Amino acid sequence: MTRLSDWTPDDLPLETKADMPGGLPPVPAAPTTDATGGDDVARTFDAFFRTFESYRAVNDARLAEIESRGSADIVSLEKLDRLDAALDATQRRLDDLTLKSRRPQIGRQGQRQMTSAALEHKAAFETYVRSGREQPLRPLEVKALSAGSDPDGGYLVPEETEAGIMRRLSQVSPIRAISGIRQVSSSTYKKPFAVTGPQSGWVGETAARPQTNSPQLAELTFPAMELYAMPAATSTLLDDAAVDMDQWIAEEVEAAFAEQEGAAFVNGDGVNKPLGFLQAPRVAENSWAWGSLGTMATGAAGAFPASDAGDTLIDLIYSLKSGYRQNGRFVMNRKTQSEIRKLKDGDGTYLWQPPAGVDGAATLLNFPITEAEDMPDIANDAPAVAFGDFRRGYLVVDRMGVRLLRDPYSAKPYVLFYTTKRVGGGVQDYDAIKLLTFAA
């Protein structure tokens, strides 16, 4: 049996008015995506909007059936599920096309602007990657980030390759894309903050100035943990001069790094990995204190309330101070967003709205949504929805330098490339992020 999650817009049959309750519009077929040009992106974006219009029509029919008969027709439910899967598939396709159009071109055109030293290092590094010869690279290796000897620590990849990896991670790692980022050259980043706040007061023009107490300072510590990936190559690939090894390495480690980072920034326990924001202590918003994240409850265990569900989202928004709220955004996974798509306000307007442009994000109550698949599903007491200014609330710490060690022995006849980078993360402002828990 074919699952609904396996459907794409191309698999959806065109439905006639006779097939749809109340003469609803047909589901549009999405265009092919063999190319990555602007026309293909525009067509996919148009298909997304037309699919969403069909989704709204079917959902409105479902709600009308519930009001008139007390339950929805099974056909309407099946069509709604199928359209929901089609929306997800079209959104993923649109995201892929947008990402491809943004990919940096790492090649000969960029090399002309590099310094002679950088070109020499790039050439020596490519020789090492293709043949394993270390002699040209050793004199050029900068030891600033060495984790040991050459065989243990590997070699720094060229700056151009490192920049390509970081740009790709910023595009495909959802939490990194919205968080604050610091680059450091040490193993730990320490950020001081005032516990008591500044000491101040009002005085008259000629009155004595009372002595103020010294501010109490504390510090947040963000250690950089080691993240690794091991792409494999064949001897044929390494012998092919037409293959850009810098771009190949960046593309191979992109998915592995992004997947691990995404999970750690949300749920990491801080042991050999960053500390995720959901691992911070949580307290009810009316008892909030620094060092924990404030939470709002929906009032229903494992669900939105039966009536006025949108009010819980409004309460969550306004639990955030105005200085943070103007840059606020929702963070949730795709399954939670699927449930929120069905919510309406008192005037019958959907709270969830599709992106206004190709490079835009879907919005909820006029605030953008970031999809992070590592967020929990809706369940009893689960913090399935986060809202806040993540640029100020969560900090990603990158230690400069990406290292690579060539291993032609462990998986013969393949050559493994043990690639490592150091990254840390944690909450830096506990007042900037609020959580919605699905609890009574």
Image (tube, rainbow, N blue to C red):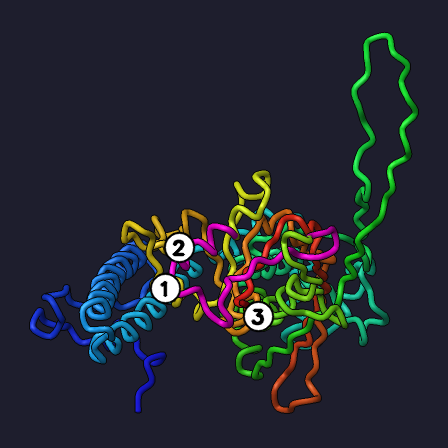
Of tags 3 and 2, the one toward the viewer is 3
| Numbered disc 2: secondary structure | loop
* Residue plotted at (64% across, 59% down): 162
Task: Say what amino acid the circle numbered 3 marks.
Answer: Asp
Q: Which residue is mark 2?
A: 362
Q: Residue 313 in the image: x percent, y percent?
A: 47, 55
* Residue plotted at (29% across, 52% down): 349
Q: Residues within 10 Å of mark 2 (few under 14, many from 20)?
A: some
* Residue plotted at (9% across, 71% down): 16
Of tags 3 and 1, the one toward the viewer is 3
Q: Earlier in the sequence, mark 2 or mark 1?
A: 1
Q: Which residue is mark 3?
A: 381
Q: Earlier in the sequence, mark 3 or mark 2?
A: 2
Mark number, residue 91: 1
Q: Is residue 392 above or below residue 83?
A: above
Residue stretch in magenta = 288-315
Identify the image quadrant of residue 278.
bottom right
Task: Say what amino acid the circle numbered 2 marks.
Answer: Ala
Identify the image quadrant of residue 160.
bottom right
Residues at marks 2 and 1 touching, judged by CB atoms closer than 8 Å: yes
- Confirm whether the magenta stretch covers residue 125: no
Cα separation, mark 3 vs mark 2, equals: 26 Å
Q: Is residue 323 above or below residue 10?
A: above
- Confirm whether the magenta stretch covers residue 311: yes
Q: Quadrant of the C terminus?
A: bottom right
